[in-house]
Image (cartoon, grey):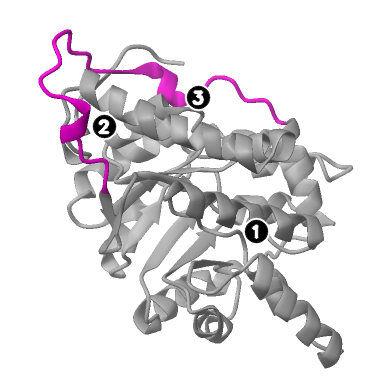
Amino acid sequence: MRKKDHIRLALADKTTLTSLDAYAIDYNSVPRFGLDTLDTSTTICNKKWQFPFFINAITAGGEECNKINQDFMEVSKACGIEFFPGSYSPALKDKNDEAVYSSWFANFVGTAYTKGYSINLGLDKDPNLILDAIEKTKAQYIQLHTNPLQEIVMPEGDHNFESWLSTLTEVSKKSPIPVILKETGFGMNEETIKLAIDLNLAAVDVSGMGGTNFARIENGRREDNSTYLENIGYTTAESLEFAAPYRDKIDIIASGGIRNPLDVVKCLALGAKAVGVSKTFLEILVNDGKEALIDEIEKWKKELKFLMILMNAKNIDELYGKIRKIDNI
């Protein structure tokens, strides 16, 4: 029920302005080259991606949520972009009835968590369970999500934060696959990014304010709202400004309020190597179906190239720095 609540409340949250609206890309009146010379690929965790935007972790668990993940997998294959499933935590639920659990788990892995993608788990989980899940899913990457503010507001939240750092440290040392530290919509400061570098993590997903606000969503599930908590954190643009000086030491992934290809190139110009998209793609999938989402992603791929032409950038690296701040919003 909680996962379904998250989907319903996320789709009802209509954010229009984000921190990226305070920036403008460089614009060149005379193109220097043609579309055929462009290279849209990027490298994340030492793996080459053909495009620098991807479908980011949204949901998992429950028939409706698993169907969303299955649809996203099919869309990602059709479009040639990466897909990161939502939380694997439903697979760690109580196993009192082993027969029922085994049947449920087989279906979960067959739909929401097809082997060979990524895996997403929170820092509140036991390190041994995380490492076991990596083996079971044969994942290419693990997103370790950190969401202390959400847990504080969530009615059934876990407030035992004392083990989070030790969990991150242990998994970073023992994981056989690249570890990505992922925020959940509240952004990252410089201290967090430095910690990720010190632990030799492969990447951070800064996931800034401006997209889905899980404090607001959890307040929507409570009777005693604490709405003042909804404004804590860093925007996507602020987080990228903190991260940019370290882009040669760790892969920077941007997410949080990504609405269109222009937002994608703004994030790349601010120092990200890849950009995750969640709610925008979820809305199209839920409201219009898989084929409509495939059409939209193909449009994004084409318009990404048009924007690179305007910015005089033959590849993703050449986008960096071709941006200016125009206003405070």
Graded by Cα atoms within 10 Å as few (under 14), some (14 to 19) or many (20 or more), the crowding at tag 3 reads: many
**Marks 1 and 3, the one that precedes in the sequence:** 3
- Left or right: 64 as drawn, with respect to 76: right
Q: Earlier in the sequence, mark 2 or mark 1?
A: 1
**Few, some or many C-alpha atoms within 10 Å of disc 2 (few <14, some 14-19, many ≥20)?**
many
| Residue 39: in magenta span | yes
Return the x and y of residue 276 as percentages of the image width and height: 46, 45
Three-letter code for the amino acid on which mark 3 is drawn: Thr
Label 1 is placed on what type of residue?
A: Gln
Looking at the picture, does residue 260 appear above or below residue 117?
above
Between marks 1 and 3 in the image, the one whose residue lies nearer the viewer: 1
Q: Which residue is mark 2?
A: 269
Q: CA separation, marks 2 and 1?
A: 32 Å
Tell me the CA gap for discs 3 and 2.
16 Å
The residue nearer to you, when weighing 267 against 149, is: 267
Which residue sits at x=51%, y=58%?
84
